[in-house]
Image (cartoon, grey):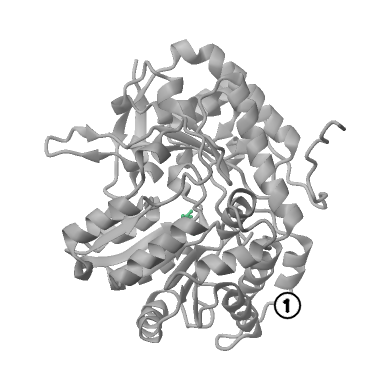
């Protein structure tokens, strides 16, 4: 058999963006000034930015040329019609509301569905989802099985919602108190793991039995479709887009941050099946985002989203996308770095608790690793653990998150394989310095989404 070829990028580069290379001494100072929070570092001081895959995609020549066709009319722009047609075709739903990003769609929808005493149930609430729900006074419950939460089990669909836990919550709170059931595909905060079609169908059935609203948070619906095609029987011959359409046909509402699988830098969508709900949401949209035919977007943004939503289902693109993420994960795993497996679609997640066993959870091992990756290699990434999801008991003691993960998110079409090889090399230094790794303590934290602006100090 022939040796498999290098996975080369299915695009070539027409425009370059120079990167600044810093020294380790500079980075130590930069990190200290930023309060050991990578969100507070200037991007010019970052070499490889794996903070997020959100809004960081490189757009194609087709998207850039579509932007020149942007119709900037206030009402009824043809760019809006273009976007609406593409989204209706994908979702099969009649009401499409454009928003400036995903969380605006969430704020509008959960602002209407939420309120004190309401309960929301999800596989895992993404941080902005949880914050928008809790801001209304409602409570958000995550339903993941123990095996899915275990970073070491090799299962094909570790993003699935645990149906049994959902049933328990429905019985406990009663259907009248449940604002919505939210299925996040892929499951961003739980390792970027996919959700199977079977799981989505079972959830739909349960929602039907109890007359519950099913929302799909489909930021990465194309990446999820890739996994279904290659891992779930019955989907081998379906196209990626057909799989996405089949999944979206199951829900009552679809929220999407276009900054992910729509391959653009800004934008979001709120898509609804019900007319009355669409009217309520439209009223909110007009108050805070903009008129119903542009939301918070300019005409050229809507053109780019429309083209991106078609491009993302290209088989060559999706293959490259998933396989290049796997490339990073596999090489780190082979080095002995504890990685969440199987590898996610948009990111590789490191189990920081396992890598830094000497750092207790209240000293944030994930945040410590994030800081060390910046110091050693100018790599920026994010903690997904007790900094992001930790809570406090009545005495102010930390109730830790279930896992202490560090996410290396891969921007779409931005870095080449040699950039990724560089990242892999930096982990040699991490392993070498591992015995000296130290934790952090919080010196400032805001009341919501604290990971964005919190500041830390190193524990001596
Ligand atoms: C990014 C994201 C959001 C929020 O979208 P923004 O565009 O960042 O506001 C919501 N849900 C999931 C799963 C996401 O990944």
Counting labels gives 1
Residue 87 in which image quadrant = bottom right
- Placement of the N terminus among the 4 image quadrants: top right
Residue 174 in which image quadrant = bottom left
| Image height of 12 relative to 20, above or below | below
Q: Who's the residue at 37% across and 15% down the image?
A: 358
Q: Position of residue 276 (x, y in %)?
A: 36, 86
- Placement of the C terminus among the 4 image quadrants: top left
Badge 1 is on which residue?
A: 69
- Residue closest to the far left: 394
- Callout 1: few (<14), some (14-19), or many (20+) C-alpha neighbours within 10 Å? some
Q: In terms of depth relative to the viewer, which is nearer, 252 or 12?
A: 252
Q: Where is residue 121 in the image (x, y as percent from the top left)?
A: 31, 57
Q: Is residue 127 visible?
A: yes
- Residue closest to the far bottom: 76
The residue carrying mark 1 has its beta carbon less than 8 Å from ligand 1: no
Q: Who's the residue at 54% across and 27% down the image?
A: 373
- Residue closest to the far front: 234
Residue 423 in which image quadrant = top right
Q: In terms of depth relative to the viewer, which is nearer, 403 or 389?
A: 403
Q: Position of residue 173 (x, y in %)?
A: 18, 61
Q: Is residue 268 visible?
A: no
Q: In terms of depth relative to the viewer, which is nearer, 233 or 63?
A: 233
| Image height of 252 relative to 141, above or below | below
Q: Who's the residue at 55% across and 16% down the image?
A: 431
Residue 137 appears left or right of 382: left
Q: Where is residue 367 in the image (x, y as percent from the top left)?
A: 41, 30
Find numbered disc 1 in the image and state the secondary structure of the residue it sits on. Answer: loop
Q: Who's the residue at 45% across and 12% down the image?
A: 436
Residue 44 appears left or right of 350: right
């Amino acid at each position: 058999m022939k040796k498999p070829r290098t996975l080369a990028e299915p695009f070539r580069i027409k425009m370059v963006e120079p990167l600044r290379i810093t020294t380790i001494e500079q980075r130590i100072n930069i990190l200290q000034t930023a309060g050991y929070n990578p969100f507070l570092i200037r991007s010019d001081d970052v070499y490889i930015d794996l903070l997020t895959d959100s809004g960081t995609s490189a757009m194609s020549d087709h998207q850039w040329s579509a932007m020149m066709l942007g119709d900037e009319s206030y009402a009824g722009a043809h760019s809006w019609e273009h976007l609406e047609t593409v989204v209706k075709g994908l979702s099969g739903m009649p009401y499409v509301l454009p928003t400036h990003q995903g969380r605006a769609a969430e704020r509008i929808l959960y602002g209407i569905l939420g309120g004190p005493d309401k309960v929301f149930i999800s596989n895992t609430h993404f941080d902005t989802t949880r914050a928008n729900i809790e801001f209304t006074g409602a409570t958000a419950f995550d339903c993941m099985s123990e095996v899915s939460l275990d970073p070491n089990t090799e299962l094909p669909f570790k993003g699935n919602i645990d149906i049994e836990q959902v049933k328990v919550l429905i019985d406990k709170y009663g259907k009248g108190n449940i604002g919505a059931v939210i299925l996040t595909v892929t499951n961003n905060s739980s390792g970027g793991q996919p959700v199977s079609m079977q799981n989505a169908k079972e959830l739909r059935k349960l929602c039907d039995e109890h007359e519950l609203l099913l929302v799909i948070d489909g930021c990465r619906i194309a990446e999820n479709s890739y996994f279904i095609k290659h891992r779930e029987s019955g989907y081998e011959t379906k196209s990626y887009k057909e799989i996405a359409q089949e999944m979206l046909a199951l829900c009552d509402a679809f929220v999407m941050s276009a900054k992910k699988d729509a391959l653009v830098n800004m934008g979001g969508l709120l898509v609804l099946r019900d007319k009355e709900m669409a009217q309520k949401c439209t009223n909110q949209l007009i108050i805070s985002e903009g008129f119903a035919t542009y939301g918070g977007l300019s005409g050229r943004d809507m053109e780019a989203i429309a083209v991106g939503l078609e491009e993302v289902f290209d088989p060559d693109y999706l293959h490259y996308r998933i396989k290049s993420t796997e490339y990073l994960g596999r090489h780190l795993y082979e080095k002995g770095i504890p990685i969440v497996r199987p590898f996610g679609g948009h990111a590789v997640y490191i189990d920081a608790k396992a890598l830094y066993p000497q750092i207790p959870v209240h000293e944030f091992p994930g945040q410590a690793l994030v800081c060390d990756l910046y110091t050693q290699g100018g790599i920026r990434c994010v903690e997904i653990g007790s900094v992001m999801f930790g809570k406090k008991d009545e005495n102010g003691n930390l109730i830790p998150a279930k896992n202490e993960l560090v996410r290396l998110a891969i921007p779409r079409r931005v870095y080449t394989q040699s950039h990724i090889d560089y990242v892999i090399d930096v982990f040699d230094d991490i392993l070498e310095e591992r015995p000296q790794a130290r934790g952090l303590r919080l010196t400032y934290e805001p009341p919501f989404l604290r990971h964005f602006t919190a500041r830390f100090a190193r524990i001596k």
